[in-house]
Amino acid sequence: MERVALLRSLSCSSSARIRLLSPSSSLSLHRRRIPSSIDHPSLHRRFHTTSLRRSSLRRHFRLSSLSASASPPWHRLSRSFSSPAAKAVATPSAHVSPEFSGAHDDAAEKLGFDKVSEEFIGECKSRAVLYKHRKTGAEVMSVSNDDENKVFGIVFRTPPKDSTGIPHILEHSVLCGSRKYPLKEPFVELLKGSLNTFLNAFTYPDRTCYPVASTNNKDFYNLVDVYLDAVFFPKCVEDFQTFQQEGWHYELNDASEEISYKGVVFNEMKGVYSQPDNILGRSSQQALFPDNTYGVDSGGDPKVIPMLTFEEFKEFHRKYYHPSNARIWFYGDDDPSERLRILSEYLDMFDESPAPNESKIEPQKLFTEPIRIIEKYPAGEGGDLKKKHMVCVNWLLSDKPLDVESELALGFLDHLLLGTPASPLRRVLLESGLGEAIVGGGIEDELLQPQFSVGLKGVSEDDIQKVEELIMSNLQKLAEEGFDPEAVEASLNTIEFSLRENNTGSFPRGLSLMLRSVGKWIYDLDPFVPLKYEKPLMALKARIVEEGPKAVFCPLIEKFVLNNPHRVTVEMQPDPMKASQDETAEREILEKVKASMTEEDLAELARATKELRLKQETPDPPEALRSVPSLSLNDIPKKSIQIPTEVGDINGVRTLQHDLFTNDVLYTEIVFDMTHLKPELLQLVPLFCQSLLEMGTKDMDFVQLNQLIGRKTGGISIYPFTSSVRGKLDPTSHVIVRGKSMSARAEDLFNLVNRILHDVQFTDQQRFKQFVSQSKARMENRLRGSGHGIAAARMDAKLNAAGWIAEQMGGISYLEFLRSLEEKVEQDWAVISSSLEEIRKSLLSKKGCLVNLTAGGKTLTNTEKFVSKFLDLLPPTSPTESASFNARISPVNEAIIIPTQVNYVGKASNIYETGYQLHGSAYVISKYIGNTWLWDRVRVSGGAYGGFCDFDTHSGVFSYLSYRDPNLLKTLDVYDGTANFLRELDLDNDGLTKAIIGTIGDVDSYQLPDAKGYTSMLRYLLGVTEEERQKRREEILSTSVNDFKAFADAIEAIKEKGVVVAVASSDDVASANKDRPNFFEVKQAL
């Protein structure tokens, strides 16, 4: 969250780095399904991915942008993009220079590498060479181009045999010190003092990836060296305490107390196993693959993790973390020979190993008949549990990997079936009224064998069979009748636009390509093939033209789904007792463990607990810290990065134009002022935005409208935005319409936006009821998986007007509104429909409107006439008066109760109210607090998956938050100790320099052209000038130790006056209120 604060004030970037996104955040990871759980935002910590994967085609599509109808964003300043569609740019051909190639071949030969193959990949304008290290057999993909955002990754095949979570725990542990970097966590030191644009790690069901990225050459090679040393020579295989910290251990502070389990991964997975969607995903995968490695959980089952021994942990590293079992990736504009030189220093230390044979993934044989399983998930006691069932139908599509043509065709079929609100399978399920929201990931092809999954949640117990029958009958109908030609055209254009635009947001393009390539390479298939979509795409389009879409897609449904007996139906039943039963079972196990111990054993355990905590809380010695390579302040540019911005006027409306190379794509935002909206209509705004894109007009139903967007544009999204403005009492609140198209389609884009805004009719009562149900299900899922976001929103709502507005549209208040609205849709539809129309009239006017355009200069000039025509159709002013949103929620400490095994704990206050004046050093100090004090006390010794802080420099709210936290009051005590930590801090020049450099890395985050234009627009809306940005930069660069001491006084007020919000279990809240009577006001949420 430090990163979010920086974006709020200096950069205001629309796309925060992937490791900075919360699990429900704006990159739509849960749809893309690479990682199943993401370390929290400002933790910058490692991903873990088990069982939740995605079609590589749709994964790329999701990275490029969000769904056209996209769910509304609740991060006030963070937003990704809309869905793609439309004609796209041709990629120019190129060739590899023989001289260039020859020089690097000679260098490779001398360094011990043989060239296996070499190709120019026109799709990404890159020269790619596959090498094999002669001594070890390690394979290296070296991709060279002019992208300054360089990427390195090393991937090991790591198939587990049980659910003890070895791959996941090892992924955490290898980054806790190594041979050359013998400190507790070099990973965290890199976060403090690196300009990285990506730094993380992922655990898949069968492989573990360690990627880094940076635009600075020196910084990039520093990151590469630390990661190579970490994976090949980690301290953790000799350090039992690292295994205990990251994996699991018994904790006992005193012989008279109860023993408990602690461990970062243990608590992370407790959080994962508290979320129904995650339980469903894991159950589906394990049932589909009962006979191979996918039948267990590589992330770890909390019931099984404590069975893992240190010896098994060490042996897993010895066996699989070897160059012979590695796939290594380089990408970017650095020297290809230098890449191999760095690698050779490590690889030459090893001999060849049998690991590639031992790690080979065996395919799952196909079933001869379908099966059905029933699982339970933890549910709250409130509400009608009979309507909280989930059902998902899953198929394993093949007994071996598919060829690229079949995979591409299935990817298009997946988009046709489920990819948009107008897709027939998605639509029929949601319109059936049998459930609240879609579950299942559609086509998932990132493992050895592809799968297809789809179902519903929020299903009545009596309707389970009906859902399954509806899925089968609809697929049968589509196999017989085919798809609407306009739907096929829209899907083709949507996916082709996405592939060619290659807009991965803040996720490095090189990393997106790496994950795509590794998805085949890891199974000993050709790593070049996944990068080359042009020929198979043209062949597929030609087939569709020649044979017709029915002949192409319908046989796929018949072959892979309808006539496929390898089908698993998973039913999930809500169980209000499951969470407490699991806790009781765990407690009984621990009681038996304690009962089996002698007094000497207990004394030894208490001593070991104390020793581990002492190690965790003792800083690394200066000489160890100095071992981690870092940049100097001389490597840092003194001037802020500026985005070309021309402020102008078209028909009396302010415009911002950004002349940037966008590969012939036009990006636009049209911003409408929300201050004329009546406060009582505020909570309808997110549903209003969805209705604009998912209801029809007089002459088009919503399916036709959705298809038109897909055929003519690169996607359109509409969402609310609100933020405090520093120095002003009133917040800034807007509705933003965001779209993109090829420059030749600019007129179509603005015409479509005009039709959506003016012509959509709010008359479809049943569709609106679906929107309410979907939004409610989404919010309930967010409560379980992103409780820290809910807590942060609630605290903001208690402290400032912008926070109150955002919480009304995306917090607990919004969930309560949705629950009451479900009944009102049936009773008061005329009133609701009229209210939606009133919102439209309040918003649509030239007054307060802003148009933002990002494209090349010629496109900007040509687009002005279309903007002018669009603006001419807007009323000059709003018919309603400006309204005041100066409201707050009561500032009491609040506990929001959900069925969970872990907690999310927040505390916040407005430090501007103490008299604190913003200084650039606050960015450095906030980041430092998160990466040291909170990391060490909340995560490392506290056992939470994460602890972090956020300083919203616009409102003055400084927040502490924890993520998947086994503690509650203990975490609050850590927050309250922050000021003393700063006062007692002994920070040397090296540590201070690293803190400054890491902060500049956040401020100067890498952005693609659309994000630059969006960033500039947000700065304009928030009144952040270039002069202020330069001033803050200079203050950051001149930060001193005295600034840390002074900041302690500012945040001391949070200890005394801060408001607390926790999303937690009922048992933990009851215990807290027992220890501190009436500390929490309790609100039952689930």
Image: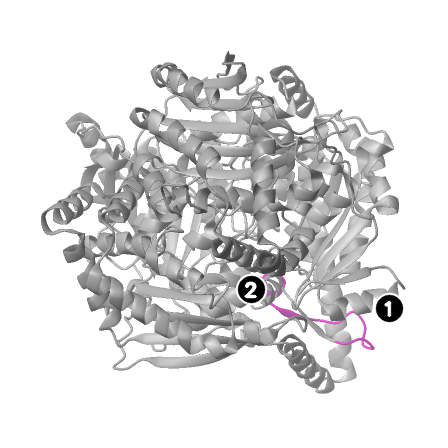
Depicted 707 relative to depicted 32: above or below? above
Q: Is residue 244 magenta?
A: yes
Q: Is residue 172 magenta?
A: no
Q: Magenta span covers which residues? A: 239-258
| SS at circle 2 | helix
| SS at circle 1 | helix
Q: Residues within 10 Å of mark 1 (few under 14, many from 20)?
A: few
Q: Which residue is mark 1?
A: 1074
Depicted 652 relative to depicted 244: above or below? above
Q: Position of residue 931 (x, y in %)?
A: 65, 44
Q: Which residue is mark 2?
A: 272
**Mark 1: which amino acid?**
Lys
33 displayed left or right of 941: left
1001 displayed left or right of 98: right
**Mark 2: which amino acid?**
Val
293 displayed left or right of 78: left
- Image quarter where the C terminus lies is bottom right
Residue positioned 16% across, 55% down in the render: 552
